[in-house]
Image: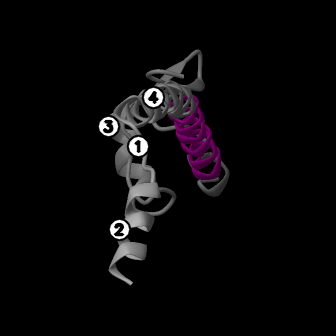
Amino acid sequence: MLAQIRKARQEESGFTLIELLMVIVILGILSGIVVFAVNGIQDKGAVSACKANVNTVTTAVEAFYANTPGTAAYPADQAAAVTALVPKYLHSWPTGVTYTVAAGAPVVTGAGC
């Protein structure tokens, strides 16, 4: 019985150090590829979020203009827009979005769009 166990242990084979190192190298290369692929996806997401913020503020400004028939004017500047829009039309003013009025029309721009 003991001889059979010794024979079975001698016939066992495992991975060599070179095989294990090759697996680690391959996993490192694959993880490097994934990191660069995810970085590009995050950049596209930031641009899309910026564009969505600009569209949201533009829609809120137009809703304010449509719901104030007595004045029929856009907010004069960004401070007035924040005061007029945040409580009723926007939850909060998005970061990176600027608002100005040029030639009587609102101009909403975003940093990084």
**Whole-percent x, y for residue 69 in the image:** 64, 53
Q: Is residue 84 above or below residue 32?
A: below
The disc, 2 or 3, on the residue closer to the chain's N-terminal end is 2
Identify residue type, mark 4: Met
Q: Nearer the viewer, residue 44 or 94?
A: 44
Q: Nearer the viewer, residue 105 or 19?
A: 19
Q: Secondary structure at mark 1?
A: loop
**Toward which corner of the image does residue 98 lie, by quadrant?**
top left
Res. 6 mark = 2
Label 1 or label 2, whichever lies nearer to me, is 2
Instruction: Tell me what residue is drawn at x 34 percent, y 34 percent.
Output: 17
Q: Check residue 50 for magenta coloring.
A: yes
Identify residue type, mark 1: Pro
Magenta segment's dominant SS is helix
Residue at numbered disc 3: 79
Image quadrant in which the C terminus is located? top right
Q: Secondary structure at mark 2?
A: helix
Q: Give the magenta-colored segment's residue range.
A: 44-64
Mark-to-mark CA distance, 4 and 1: 49 Å
Image quadrant in which the N terminus is located? bottom left
Label 4 or label 3, whichever lies nearer to me, is 4
Mark-to-mark CA distance, 4 and 3: 61 Å
Q: Residues within 10 Å of mark 1 (few under 14, many from 20)?
A: some
The disc, 4 or 1, on the residue closer to the chain's N-terminal end is 4
Mark-to-mark CA distance, 4 and 2: 31 Å
Identify residue type, mark 3: Ala
**Whole-percent x, y for residue 81 in the image:** 42, 41
Label 2 or label 3, whichever lies nearer to me, is 2
- Which residue appears farthest toward the top when viewing the image? 103
Residue at numbered disc 1: 94
Res. 65 mark = none
Q: Secondary structure at mark 4?
A: helix
